[in-house]
Amino acid sequence: MTVQEQKIAIIIVNWNTGQCLADCLHSLADLPEKDLIEEVTVIDNASSDRSIAVAKLAVSDTGNQPAVRFIMNKRNAGFAAANNIGLRRLEQRGSQAHALLLNPDTVALPGLLLGMLEVFKKSERIGIVGPRILNADQTLQPSVRNFPGGKEIALYMLKLGSQVKEAKIDYGQEQVVPQVMGAFFLIRRECWQQVGQLDEGYFVWFEEVDYCRHAYDLGWQVWYTPRACGIHLGGVSFRQVVGIRKNWPWLKSILHYARKHLSTPVVMGLYIMSVINVLLWIPASVKQWQHKIKTEQL
């Protein structure tokens, strides 16, 4: 099957992203290779803003090309669970398409889909592909990381993430990597059929890290390619969340990852570290709440 004969089913999970979702859908409609898109499925996690209404207007402007389907959750089911709704829908329809998990705060640049599909031609064991990701100002956004161990997770908990060693990678070269960022996450059809759905033990964060690790365990490769490119604004949904509502899901996810992939003594040590983590973010949370209250009063 040639690249032009393959199809990509795009899954976007939305939660209060304002204009970003509409901009993302517009960028997909503007792709010269948009015929590669089988369908776009937007799963909304009970947003309280107008992001879905604005997105539907954007879809109307494009004549629903590519076709966009909206699924409305009655509650915020989390990022992994919402993506799984889209993956289950592909299974139920017997779709032969590859699955692209796409963040709503992204902009697809021309050649994105074609460039990622081209990588699959290298080997039938390439299961996941991530593109070159740019910030809004067109600077490079690091998108490849090593799998975190106990030391790295401890540094994150102590808010010393800047001391975690970056993956040694030339972002100008196409290559096998440990994991790619979940903002643009293309999964080969045969890979998602074997690996299955995302672990819903992750409400948000670390689900793509876990998925890459699971894929590797089953003999699949993860690749990064610079021939495909997209823009990622980053963190649009969670900028609205402060204090414990933001830190607690992160802490639960990182501990869930540790329990699955690290030794029992390391996990026990990380649980002790989690107490320090809570003590570290309490003062910052108070300041964030105070700032939010003052802003709302203006």
Image (cartoon, helix red, strand yellow):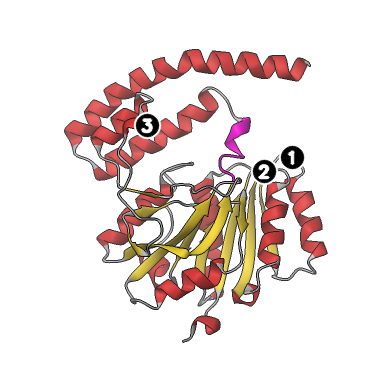
- For residue 17, the mark is 2
Query: Would residue 271 be counted in the magenta stretch?
Result: no
Q: Residue at x 72, y 60 (%)?
A: 26
Q: Which residue is mark 3?
A: 162
Give the CA separation, mark 3 to mark 1: 34 Å
- For residue 49, the mark is 1
Whole-percent x, y for residue 237 in the image: 61, 39
Whole-percent x, y for residue 166 in the image: 33, 43
Frontmost residue, 1 versus 96: 1
Q: Residues within 10 Å of mark 2 (few under 14, many from 20)?
A: many
- For residue 121, the mark is none
The amino acid type found where label 3 is placed reads Ser
The amino acid type found where label 2 is placed reads Thr
Mark 3 or mark 1, earlier in chain = 1
What segment carries the magenta color? 233-240
Q: Is residue 265 visible?
A: yes
Mark 1 or mark 2, earlier in chain = 2
Give the CA separation, mark 1 to mark 2: 8 Å
